[in-house]
Amino acid sequence: MTLRPRSLRLPGLLALAVALAAPAASAGVIVNIDGARFGYAESPHIPDVGEAVTPIDAAPSGPFSRILFTAGTYRITNAFGQLGALYQAFRFNQATDGAPWSWSFLITNASDGDKAVLYGEAGDLGATADAVGDQDVVRDFEAFFTLTSNAWLDFMVRDYYVGDNAGGVSLLIQEVAPLDPAAVPEPASMIMMGVAGSALAAAGFARRRKA
């Protein structure tokens, strides 16, 4: 039997629909975190790995705040400069002259009560987005995490007041290994495996709250 192009249309559309509905693939997904939309609720201190926080989502239908990932190990890198990446850094309080720029983010496991399960940051505050983005620890940032089950993850900048921010953070998330069925699951649904980069000074981050 000869298959004509018309006969392949329906299967092709079905395959496309399945692909669009599938979780992030090993080829990687770029996550653009709008610094003026996605943060976390008021907090007296910088959240720790494993601490429960409540994400702020100023755009409930936004395409980049929540993504479904399958069980496996993933690599996080700075996506700036790649096709589809929108942000190099974000600025605290854009209306204030001299307000600093930063590159930092927080990921919470929305499938586990909005628990902060991965936290990453790199570099120091800077006077411009270029100054922050040019730092080696920002440009070459790399971190890994493992999910022991499928999970929805929320992405946000490390800030609890986002209304006056500008810019954002763009991440590339790539699966490097699927979950080994023979592996013994860890208690947490997501485990930090390693981070390359230095921490932002807490005093520097708190500056904008005292201004």
Image (cartoon, helix red, strand yellow):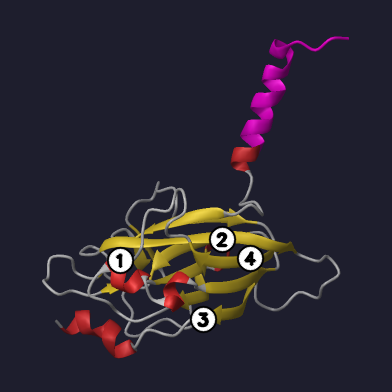
Labels 2 and 4 touching (C-beta < 8 A): yes
Amino acid type, label 2: Ile
Residues at marks 2 and 4, CA–CA distance in whole angstroms: 6 Å
Picture residue at 30% right of the left edge, 66% below the top: 90
Q: Give the mark, 2 or 1, whose residue is nearer the N terminus.
A: 1
Labels 1 and 4 touching (C-beta < 8 A): no
Residues at marks 1 and 4, CA–CA distance in whole angstroms: 24 Å
- Residue wearing tag 3: 49
Amino acid type, label 3: Val
Q: Give the mark, 3 or 1, whose residue is nearer the N terminus.
A: 3
Indicate which disc residue 90 carries.
Answer: 1
Residues at marks 2 and 3, CA–CA distance in whole angstroms: 18 Å
Picture residue at 14% right of the left edge, 75% below the top: 98
Q: Give the mark, 1 or 4, whose residue is nearer the N terminus.
A: 4
Q: Quadrant of the C terminus?
A: bottom left
Element type at mark 3: loop
Residues at marks 3 and 4, CA–CA distance in whole angstroms: 17 Å
How crowded pointer 1 is (Cα within 10 Å; few <14, some 14-19, many 20+) is rated as many
* Between 142 and 208, the one nearer to me in the picture: 142
- Residue wearing tag 4: 74
- Residue wearing tag 2: 173
With 192 as the anchor, is 208 left or right in this view?
left
Q: Give the mark, 3 or 4, whose residue is nearer the N terminus.
A: 3
